[in-house]
Amino acid sequence: MPKIDPRIFRAYDIRGRAGEQITEEAATLIGIAFGEEVKKRSGNAHPKIVVGRDARVSSPALLEALNNGLQVAGCRVLDMGETPSPLNYFTICRLELDGGAQITASHNPGHDNGIKLQLKDAEAFAGENLQRLRESIEQKGKRKEVSATSNQQPATENIDAITPYIEHLQKMFGGIGRGMTVVVDCGNGVAGPVYVKVLKNTGARVIELFTEPDGNFPNHPADPSKHSTLKDLQETVRKEKANLGLAFDGDGDRLGIVDEKGIAIPAPLSFSQ
């Protein structure tokens, strides 16, 4: 009987040590259980679920395992690849999908990983829903083998979610940054390739810090809620006489702000739980 560590089911998401608590087997089991839950809620035998991942070293294999589980449950999987979590929510709503899943441990250290789950209209699948999901996995007692039903599984479709997202934000904020200098520190998380383009599209001059995704987070933790991670951003804002400094977490859904004097705004803003 496969086992899954009950401690990984948190209040808002699933999170734990990659390879120990968050394993490929766990990801597959979660995919099967979540897929079956979405089927039940949607009334669709083959619901559409969008998936993505952050830049952590463990994320590609976990995403593949999650996709396998979703397909075993009969879901049609739309794979965005390496993308910030907000693109998952945006894509669910834009394409009117039945749900979504993101492989990420957000601002946690690189050795952790996890899964964020969403329902239709990007409603968070959290709280008691996660506990019931855990109970469903435990009660089922044995894993459905992917190979046994491979000929019945819907295929995974790779999609470009980044271009529509950037175009949407361009329509909303294009030109708003003209005459501004903005320093962006992505902490080597997955936000860099997307949000640098978004900011440049506003007309702002953008100075980049650690915008290349690297799941080892070699420069500092991608956690703007810790003021110690904002040191490079603050120094660069002062040196460049910038108007603003922005720091993103590992999956791009948490934001730290530094003003023109290099002073951190007390509480980081969060786009999601």
Image (cartoon, rainbow, N blue to C red):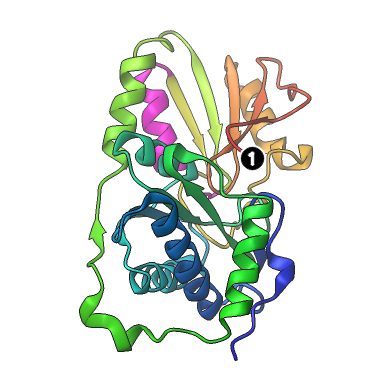
Residue at (72% x, 71% y) in the render:
6
The residue lying toward the viewer, choosing from 200 and 232, is 200
Question: What's under tag 1, amino acid-wise?
Answer: Gln
Q: Is residue 171 above or below residue 106?
A: above
Q: Is residue 96 above or below residue 35?
A: above
Secondary structure under tag 1 reads loop
Q: Position of residue 171 (x, y in %)?
A: 31, 17
In what quadrant of the picture does the N terminus appear?
Answer: bottom right
The stretch of residues the image draws in magenta is: 188-204
Residue at (72% x, 36% y) in the render:
231
Q: Position of residue 48 (x, y in %)?
A: 31, 53
Let me know if residue 191 is in the magenta part: yes
Give the quadrant of residue 261: top right
Residue at (67% x, 17% y) in the render:
259
Within 10 angstroms of label 1, few (less than 14), some, or many (20 or more) residues?
few
On the image, numbered disc 1 is attached to which residue? 273
Let me know if residue 56 is in the magenta part: no
Q: Position of residue 143 (x, y in %)?
A: 49, 85
Q: Is residue 225 above or below residue 100?
A: above
